[in-house]
Image (cartoon, rainbow, N blue to C red):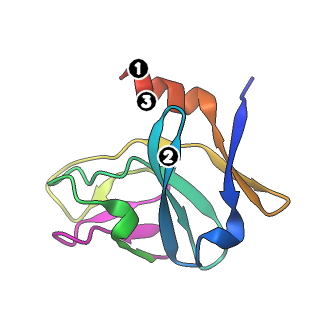
Amino acid sequence: MSQWIEISALDAIPQRGARLVKTPLGCVAVFRTATDEVYALDNACPHKGGPLADGIVHGTQVTCPLHNWVISLETGMAQGADEGQVATYRAKVTDGRIYLDTEFLQHRAVA
C-alpha cells in the first residue's frame, strides 16, 4: 500500500512550470502541465545532468535547459536523443495539494 507525502500546493507551481522539491528522501523535480497534470522526475538530464526543473515544459515533455534534450514526463525517456532515461515517481493532486508516493522515493534512495 502506498504512503503519500504532501509536498506543495498545486498553485505553488505555475502551469507549464516546475519546482525542485526537497523531500526527506531526496530532491525531486515536480512538473505541472498546462492542463494541471503533475509529474515527478529525477532532476538530472541523462545527457549531461542538466537541471530539468529549470527546463521548458510543453505538453507532457520537458526540454533540458542545457542541450535541448526532450524528456517525457510520463516515462522519463529521452526523445530524439541517442539514449537515456530519467527515473519517474508517482505523484497525485488531491484537494489542490501535490503528493508524492514515498515507496517510489525509497526505491530511489536505495539505488
Residue under numbered circle 2: 22
Q: Dot 2, how many residues are within 10 Å of its Cα: few (below 14), some (14-19), or many (20+)?
A: few
Instruction: Name the side, left or right, on which 64 lies relative to 81.
Output: right
Q: In the rendered structure, which disc, 1 or 2, sits on the residue that comes first in sequence? A: 2
- Tag 1 secondary structure: helix
Task: Indicate the amino acid at tag 1.
Answer: Val
The residues bearing labels 1 and 2 have C-alpha atoms spaced at a distance of 17 Å
Residue under numbered circle 1: 110
Q: Dot 3, how many residues are within 10 Å of its Cα: few (below 14), some (14-19), or many (20+)?
A: some
> Is-magenta flag for residue 73?
yes
Kindly indicate whether the residue at mark 3 contacts the one at mark 1 (C-beta within 8 angstroms): yes
The quadrant holding residue 37 is: bottom right
Q: Quick one: which residue is furthest to the right in this view?
A: 95
Kindly indicate whether the residue at mark 2 contacts the one at mark 3 (C-beta within 8 angstroms): no
Image x and y of residue 35, in percent = 66, 76
Q: Nearer the viewer, mark 3 or mark 2?
A: 2
Residue under numbered circle 3: 108
Instruction: Name the side, left or right, on which 95 lies relative to 48.
Output: right
Front residue of 108/72: it is 108
The residues bearing labels 3 and 2 have C-alpha atoms spaced at a distance of 14 Å
Residue 84 vs 73, above or below: the answer is above
Quadrant location, the C terminus: top left
Residue drawn at point x = 25 percent, y = 72 percent: 65
Image x and y of residue 108, in percent = 43, 29
Image x and y of residue 90, in percent = 60, 43
Residue drawn at point x = 35 percent, y = 69 percent: 54
Quadrant location, the N terminus: top right
Residue drawn at point x = 28 percent, y = 57 percent: 78
Residue drawn at point x = 85 percent, y = 59 percent: 95
